[in-house]
Image (tube, grey):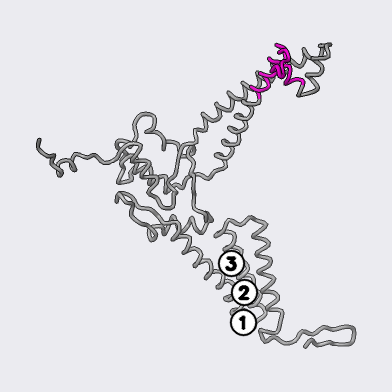
Amino acid sequence: MSSPDIELADRNVSPIRGFALVAAKINSDSDKTTTIYRRFDELSARNLLFYQAELAELEDDLKQLDDEDRVANDKTSEACQRDWRSFEIHANGVNGTEVRAREKEKMELVMKIREKLEKYHAALAAHRLLLQSPLASKSTLRALRNWFFNNSAGTKDGDRAAQLWGASSNIFSDPHDLVALRVPADQDRFSSFIHHNFGVFFQTASPDGRTTYTSEAAIARFIAILSTILAAVLLFGSIISLYVVKSDKALLGMLSAWTVLFAACVGLLTNARRDQVFAATAAYAAVLVVFISGNLGGTTPASITLGNCTCTGT
């Protein structure tokens, strides 16, 4: 028997495709920002409605049993209504006790309600968590979708055959039904601005060479350095400029300009809330006011007139 042609065998081996290829693509991003999946909002809503309707029917059945228990006069029935141990004994026949059909029926109903209620609450919590999860980045979703449809040009009508067939070919159709399991830690406005406008400087090629990834870690380092420099400029730049200027009107004008610039930086470049913006701006302005009210700028001592006496501060 002749040995197989190794070179021919290598040419006949097909690369991974389908679900294996899509999974490898999602896992190839070191930042894991491509872990994007459908939430199935409509199905989740319908599932919750089904749970809700089923529990409503079970609740109605339990209320009917409670209404019947109110008119029961025997002591055993009253004990089962007041004591869980008695209820359990007569429902399950513990220690040779005769099983009462009515109590057994009620116990089965209670256990069924408990099981369904736990599943319903778990589904509610999971759906709430998904709704509060951040949406996928538009640029990441666009790149992943173009790869999924072999749209190398990224044009509107450039979609080709999808990586997955059947109903799975529509997984990226509705961006509002998608959830990103992981998003970059720093999602402030400054980081988003750098990512969308200068992300090309932080890109690395993917292993397949067909797409590029924007390194969120590199952007985070760049933002940290730039933010440190900007904070230093806002503090020391304002102090130096206010120290050099001698005119009172110029001092007030520069104080206002530096305060407005600081408020704009905090409000536009970060995700600070309004109260945080006001607090930070007030603290910054207070530091500058204290600085210009002293004698560091070479101003003359303040004079205060009390009646016929004039007191000069030293």
Pointer 2 with pointer 1, Cβ within 8 A: yes
Circle nearer the N terminus (2, 3): 2
Against 302, residue 173 (above or below) is above
Give the mark nearest the N terminus, 3 or 1: 1
Residue at image location 56% in from the left, 29% down from the top: 45
Label 3 packing within 10 angstroms: few (<14), some (14-19), many (20+): some
Farthest residue toward the left?
2
In-front residue for pair 122/109: 109
Image location of residue 191, percent across then percent down? 49, 58
Q: Could you say whether the residue bearing mark 2 is in a helix, strand or loop?
A: helix
Q: Nearer the viewer, mark 2 or mark 3?
A: 3
Neighbor class of circle 2 (other Cα within 10 Å; few <14, some 14-19, many 20+) is some
Q: Is there any visible trace of residue 24 in the rendered image?
A: yes
Residue 168 versus residue 4: which sits nearer the camera?
4
Q: Secondary structure at mark 1?
A: loop
Disc 3 target residue:
261
Which residues are the magenta region?
86-113
Which numbered circle lies on residue 254? 2
Whether 245 is drawn above or below 262: the answer is below
Please indicate whether residue 200 sits to the left or right of residue 300 in the image.
left
Marks 3/1: CA–CA distance: 18 Å
Q: Amino acid at mark 2?
A: Met
Q: Quadrant of the N terminus?
A: top left
Q: Is residue 96 magenta?
A: yes
Q: Position of residue 295 (x, y in %)?
A: 70, 84
